[in-house]
Image: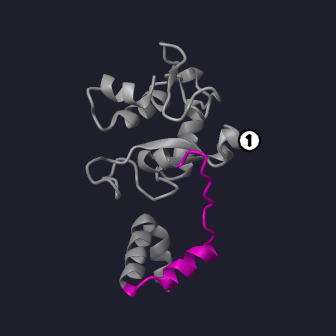
């Protein structure tokens, strides 16, 4: 099917592409694109089978997913959005986390927990084959020092809220 045929089949809704990604990523349908098959052109889709793969048959186990989400503090590792809260870039929806690869499988990455990270749906939609490295403490400090005082104070408030026990220990002599 072409993207035009999919849009027509959806009744002309503007969010048809997001729904295709949801069907693929969340529901387990094997929907192929030109990234998967060279004979498909951009904007063409192929539903490989009408039956979705069951969750247990997908590559990443429930245990690994739970470990990665917990390790990442139920926070998107690209934008910092927290699961269940209103998304900072899309105020009409709450943050929903997915598991994404740091090094994409198409670039040789694996499904090992060390190569996985929590990503919100907004970042995950734009993260295909994109690998961003996490900033080290020096880069973070440089960015905070460059920020206006009001933004520095907001960062401090956020850190104190996120780490109340550690902040109290640091602030008390």
Which residue lies at the image location 59% right of the left edge and 30% below the top edge?
A: 61
Quarter of the image for the N terminus: give it.
top left
- Which residues fall within the magenta stretch? 127-149
Q: Secondary structure at mark 1?
A: loop
Where's residue 26, x and y in %?
Answer: 45, 30
* In magenta stretch: residue 145: yes
Q: Which residue is mark 1?
A: 108
Residue 120 appears at what percent x and percent y?
44, 48
Number of marks: 1
Which one is in front, 70 or 21?
A: 21
- Residue 47 appears at what percent x and percent y? 50, 19
Determine the residue located farthest toward the top in the rendered image.
Answer: 50
Q: Nearer the viewer, residue 24 or 61?
A: 24
Give the image quarter of residue 159: bottom left
Residue 79 belongs to magenta span: no
Q: Is residue 149 above or below residue 58?
A: below
From the viewer's perspective, is 32 left or right of 4? right
User: Horizontal and vertical percent for residue 140?
Assistant: 56, 74
What color scheme is it? one colour
Which residue lies at the image location 48% right of the left edge and 53% below the top edge?
76
Residue plotted at (53% across, 49% down): 127
10 Å neighbourhood of mark 1: few (<14), some, or many (≥20)? few
Residue 153 vs 38, above or below: the answer is below
- Side of 139 where 167 appears, left or right: left
Task: Please state if 65 lies on the left or on the right of 7 as rendered.
Answer: right
In the image, farthest residue toward the right: 108
Locate residue 133: give its quadrant.
bottom right
């Amino acid at each position: 099917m072409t993207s035009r045929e999919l849009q027509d089949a959806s009744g002309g809704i503007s969010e048809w592409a997001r729904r295709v990604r949801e069907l693929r990523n969340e529901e387990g349908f094997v929907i192929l694109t030109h990234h998967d098959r060279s004979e498909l052109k951009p904007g063409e889709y192929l539903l490989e089978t009408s039956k979705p793969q069951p969750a247990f048959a997908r590559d990443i186990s429930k245990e690994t997913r739970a470990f990665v989400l917990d390790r990442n503090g139920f926070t998107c590792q690209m934008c910092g959005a927290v699961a269940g809260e209103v998304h900072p870039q899309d105020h009409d929806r709450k943050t929903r986390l997915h598991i994404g690869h740091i090094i994409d499988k198409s670039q040789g990455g694996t499904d090992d927990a060390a190569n996985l990270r929590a990503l919100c749906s907004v970042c995950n939609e734009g993260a295909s084959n994109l690998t961003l490295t996490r900033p080290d403490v020096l880069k973070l400090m440089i960015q905070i020092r460059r920020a206006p005082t009001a933004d520095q104070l907001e960062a401090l408030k956020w850190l104190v809220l996120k780490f109340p026990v550690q902040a109290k220990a640091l602030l008390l002599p």
